[in-house]
Amino acid sequence: DAGVIQSPRHEVTEMGQEVTLRCKPISGHDYLFWYRQTMMRGLELLIYFNNNVPIDDSGMPEDRFSAKMPNASFSTLKIQPSEPRDSAVYFCASSMGQGFWTEAFFGQGTRLTVV
Amino acid sequence: RKEVEQDPGPFNVPEGATVAFNCTYSNSASQSFFWYRQDCRKEPKLLMSVYSSGNEDGRFTAQLNRASQYISLLIRDSKLSDSATYLCVVNSNTGNQFYFGTGTSLTVIP
């Protein structure tokens, strides 16, 4: 398996523009997580899905952020409109099952810069 | 209060040194614990799980103290390749959410 695949790897956009980040989880994994990482706040869980259903989106910072998972192999995180403070590395991760000792596998991340 | 707290460091140690990191977690009902490693500009990857009885993997030893709600990682005989950020991770009591500490930066100096 190729692992968790995220695209794009880098994104530079102007304030006010819409940004869409994409993720393909590992096949067979039924949990998908979106994280944001900054120097100040570390890795923050934004939202996670189980079997394509959003379970907890309490980490989503504002209504400008939305996430979807239309099928088991694809998820998007959208920011509309984007702001400079959204600049961060966004990671998608997936895991299998609900066992307490399951491992989360991360994609390589999308480095977002909003200018 | 954050779910997981770590000393951010940085820790700068010479090759061959022993270094220890600690982290604390707030939810006493947490069920599982991990250390992840993150290299510069890369994604986090699992280093090792942390079991109640403590466990060892080569030069790495992980310990859990449930009573005090802290987790530790000991690295013996540090190598240059150990330079990275080490993330303490706690799984929620439902097993569905991974909470990450902000990471501890380690640099091993020749």
Image: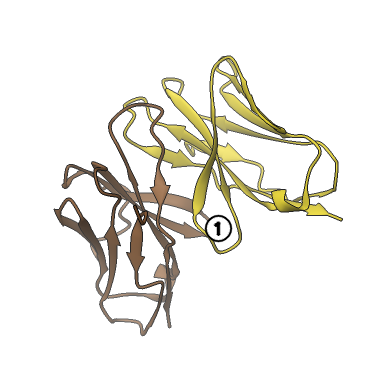
Chain letter for the residue marked with disc 1 in the picture: A
Point 61% across, 19% down: residue: B54
Residue with the most extreme left position: A70
Give percent across and percent down for residue A45.
Answer: 38, 48
Q: Secondary structure at mark 1?
A: loop
State which chain is coloured yellow.
B
Q: Seen in the image, is A93 located left or right of residue B60?
A: left
Q: Seen in the image, is A44 located left or right of residue B72?
A: left
Point 41% across, 37% down: residue: A103
Q: Seen in the image, is B99 located left or right of residue A5?
A: right
Residue position marked by numbered label 1 in the rendering: A40
Point 58% across, 31% down: residue: B24
State which chain is coloured brown.
A
Give percent across and percent down for residue A97.
Answer: 28, 33
State the image quarter where residue A50 is shown: top left
Of B101 and A10, which appears nearest the observer? Answer: A10
